[in-house]
Amino acid sequence: MTGDPRRRVPIGLCDRCVHQRIVPTSRSIFTMCEAEGMPRYPGVPVMRCRAFTPRDEPAGGGGAQATPPPPAVR
Ligand code: SF4
């Protein structure tokens, strides 16, 4: 393989979703969906998806994860 394997066509929401799994092969890179009830290999680019969960939020939604307070500055 030549070139950077991370250099690929943007595939929409999946690139920011916790359910995405990148599957590299010797000639291609596939995006696989591990969300329950969703197609394993979605048609890309995915622009709308009911199971989309941003990577910066916990899987399953909610977004109520506690973050520690910043250290006190004196
Ligand atoms: S849940 Fe939707 S946005 Fe997330 S990886 Fe699967 S198809 Fe893509």
Image (spheres, helix red, strand yellow):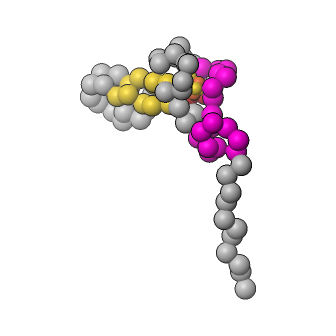
Assess whether residue 53 is covered by the magenta stretch.
yes
Magenta residues, as a range? 46-63
Q: Quadrant of ligand 1?
A: top right
Is residue 20 left or right of 5 when viewed as pictured?
right
Assess whether residue 69 is covered by the magenta stretch.
no
Using the rendered view, name the quadrant where residue 29 is placed.
top left
Query: Where does residue 4 sit, x and y in percent of width and height?
Result: 36, 35
Residue in the picture at 73% in, 85% down: 74
**Count of residue discs:** 0
Using the rendered view, name the quadrant where residue 13 is placed.
top right
Which quadrant does the N terminus fall into?
Answer: top left
Report the front residue among 18 and 6.
18
Report the front residue among 2 and 11.
11
Report the front residue among 13 and 62.
62
- Image height of 55 relative to 31, above or below: below
Secondary structure mainly formed by the magenta segment: loop
- Image height of 72 relative to 48, above or below: below
Is residue 64 left or right of 54 when viewed as pictured?
right
Query: Where does residue 71 sit, x and y in percent of width and height?
Result: 67, 75
Residue in the picture at 33% in, 33% down: 3
Query: Where does residue 68 sit, x and y in percent of width and height?
Result: 66, 65
Query: Where does residue 17 sit, x and y in percent of width and height?
Result: 57, 33
Residue 27 visible to an observer of this rendering: yes
Residue in the picture at 63% in, 26% down: 51
- Image height of 44 relative to 21, above or below: above
Residue 15 visible to an observer of this rendering: no
Residue farthest bottom in this picture: 74
Residue in the picture at 67% in, 38% down: 61
Using the rendered view, name the quadrant where residue 2 is placed.
top left
